[in-house]
Image (tube, rainbow, N blue to C red):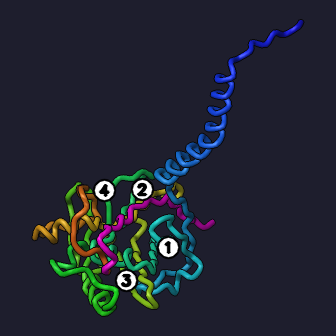
Amino acid sequence: MKMHHMALPHRAIVGCQNSSFLSCTFLPVIVLLIVIALCGCSSTLELTSSWTNHELKVDGTDTEWKDATTLIPGPQVFVGIKNDRENLYICLKTSNRITQVQMLALGTTVWIDTEGKKNKTFGIQFPVSGLLQGRRFPSQQNPEELRRLIDAAQRQFEILGPGKDERRRIADKQEKGLDVHLGFADGTLTYELKIPLHKTPDHAYAVGADPSRPLTIGLETGDYSDAMRAQLGGSSQPAGGSGGGRGGRGGGQSPGGMGSDAPEPLKHWLIVHLTVPN
């Protein structure tokens, strides 16, 4: 059968060619950008806890974490997870000055959800928020300010939850089997946390997880904007690290004298598989 082709006007042909050129040129780029954005928004790091056959010493050094940490995409923080039969161990390390100041001055919270979701019903905040008490953020030119802030942070931590605004401040860092410590050496801030895996009369604050099921761990610092609003307004409200509201960027000096742009807080969730030996 002979096929008949309909002739198109020259302007229509040119229009179709131009449209095809634009589609071929820009459409893949647009699709790629959308995919990258979606992956970035929904990405959750999945880790398998490393097994240790001895109890780790929680002292704020990375001695037990050589080649045992993974870089979290974005905030320049390395995270390590280990467990033995009795405890879960978490290590955070960063050499990024802004992230260090956020962790120290604005509070750092580790959330643990045994249901594998992102529920904020059990958290440990250390350092606690509000340590600055109206003082300016430590500057890069004075490392002794940073060390004094670390020393002040070592004295206490808070248990958050299960209620939204429920928090209990604890002065003894080894209370109920918990232990947490900070260290600073060669420009790197190291955070170590030990928390019991099983709830007992002696260990009221524990993970309480089924080792055969994955759990989620949230890592969160306070929001610099909230801290600046509280500082400028004379509010005594904690800066954050345990949720809190959002709003416009406040003025003033940014952490470490980094300029007027407020950095984003650390907010990341991990899916963690505990290691169970045979």
On residue 114, the disc is: 2
Magenta region: 257-278
Q: Nearer the viewer, residue 191 or 277?
A: 191
In the image, farthest residue toward the top: 1
| Residue identifier under label 3 | 182
Report if the CB atoms under discs 2 and 3 are less than 8 Å apart: no
Q: Earlier in the sequence, mark 2 or mark 1?
A: 1
Mark 3 Cα shell of 10 Å, populated few (<14), some (14-19), many (≥20):
many
Q: CA distance from mark 1 to mark 4?
A: 24 Å
Residue type, label 3: Leu
- Residue 170, image x and y in percent? 23, 75
Q: CA distance from mark 4 to mark 3?
A: 24 Å
* Residue 239 is covered by the magenta coloring: no
| Residue identifier under label 4 | 121
Q: CA distance from mark 1 to mark 3?
A: 14 Å
Q: Quadrant of the C terminus?
A: bottom right
- Residue 107, image x and y in percent? 29, 72
Residue type, label 4: Thr
> In front: mark 1 or mark 3?
1
In the image, farthest residue toward the right: 1
Q: Nearer the viewer, residue 206 or 90?
A: 90
